[in-house]
Amino acid sequence: MIAALGLTLLALLGQPQPRTYYWRDAAGQRHITNTPPPADAEILEPPPPPAMEPEKAVQKVLVRPKRTLDGKRLAPTLNPAQQEAWDALDRHMAKTRAAGNRRGLEAVAESLIHDCLWGNGLWFMPAAPVLAVALMGLLGWWLALGLGPGPKVPLVGGFLLLGLALGHLLLSVFLYTPQAARLHQNLELLECHLGTGQPLGAEKQKWMRQRYAALDQAAEPFQVPWRFPREVQALRDAMKRVVVEP
C-alpha cells in the first residue's frame, strides 16, 4: 500500500500541475481558479491540506509568540491570512470529528506540537550542550598543559562540569523557553478551533492552564534538565485527550 502511494506521488510529481489561485473580488466573493486573478483582486492564502498531511496543515497556522519589553507574553493577533487558515483548520476538525476519526484529530494535535518544538531551526539546538562540553573540555585540557597529573585531572573535570552547566543554560534559554512559548500560544489557539462550535469546557480549560504553567516552570534554567521533556509529554497527552473529548 505504501509503495503504491509512493509510486502514485512520483507519477504526479513528474507531470506539470496547473497552479491554483485563491482570491476575492471587489464584491467580497471568493474564487478558486487555475488562471491568474484580475489586478484588483485580493490574493488569499490557500487552505490547509487534508488530514493525510497534518504537519503541512499545521505549518500554515502556526503563530510565533510575541513578548513585551519586560518579557510578558502578548496575546496573539492574527492577520487575515492566519485567521482564515485557523478557520479552515476549525472546519477540517469539525469534518474529522463528524466522521468519528479519532486518529485524525490526534494527528492534528501531534503535528502542531511537533512543529512548535522543532520548527524554524529549533531542531539544531540539542547540539548546544555537546558543543559546550566539548569546548570547555578542550579549554580545560589546554590550560592543564604542562601541569602534573595531580592538578590536571581536577582542572579538566571542573571545566567539563562547567560545560555541562553552560549546555543546560543554553538549552533552557534558546530551546526550552521558545518551545514553551510556542506550545502555550498555539495550543491555546487550537483549543478555540476544535471544530465543536463552542468553547472548551471549564474543567478542561483549568486542566490545560495547569499544564501550561507546569511547562513554563520546567523551562526555567534552574530546573533539572529532564523535567521539561517530561512536561512536554504530559502536555501532549492532555492535548490529545482534549481534541478528542473537548
Image (spheres, rainbow, N blue to C red):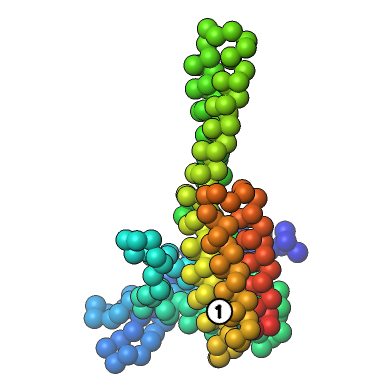
Give the residue displayed 41% in from the left and 67% down from the top.
73
Quadrant of residue 99 within the rendered picture:
bottom right
For residue 9, side relative to residue 26 (left or right): right
Give the residue displayed 60% in from the left and 24% down from the top.
157
Label 1 sits on a secondary structure element that is: helix
Give the residue displayed 75% in from the left and 64% down from the top.
1
Q: In the rendering, at what x and y percent does residue 78 appear?
A: 38, 75
Numbered circles on residues, count: 1
Q: What residue type is disc 1 on? A: Glu
In the rendered image, the vertical position of residue 85 relative to residue 213, given as above or below = below
* Name of the residue lying farthest toward the left: 40
Give the residue displayed 56% in from the left and 91% down from the top.
198
**Viewport quadrant of the C terminus:** bottom right
Q: In the rendering, at what x and y percent does residue 54 appear?
A: 59, 69
Q: Can residue 59 be seen in this view?
A: no
Q: Which of 146 and 35 is in front in this view?
A: 146
Classify mark 1: residues with Cα within 10 Å, few (<14), some (14-19) or many (20+). many
For residue 34, side relative to residue 129 (left or right): left
* Name of the residue lying farthest toward the right: 1
Q: Nearer the viewer, residue 137 or 109?
A: 137
Q: Mark 1 points at which residue?
A: 191
Q: In the rendering, at what x and y percent does residue 33 appear?
A: 40, 80
Quadrant of residue 44 within the rendered picture:
bottom left
Q: In the rendering, at what x and y percent does residue 64 appear?
A: 43, 64
Q: Which of 86 and 3 is in front in this view?
A: 86
Q: Is residue 179 visible?
A: yes
For residue 7, side relative to residue 134 (left or right): right
In the rendered image, the vertical position of residue 212 relative to residue 3, given as above or below = below
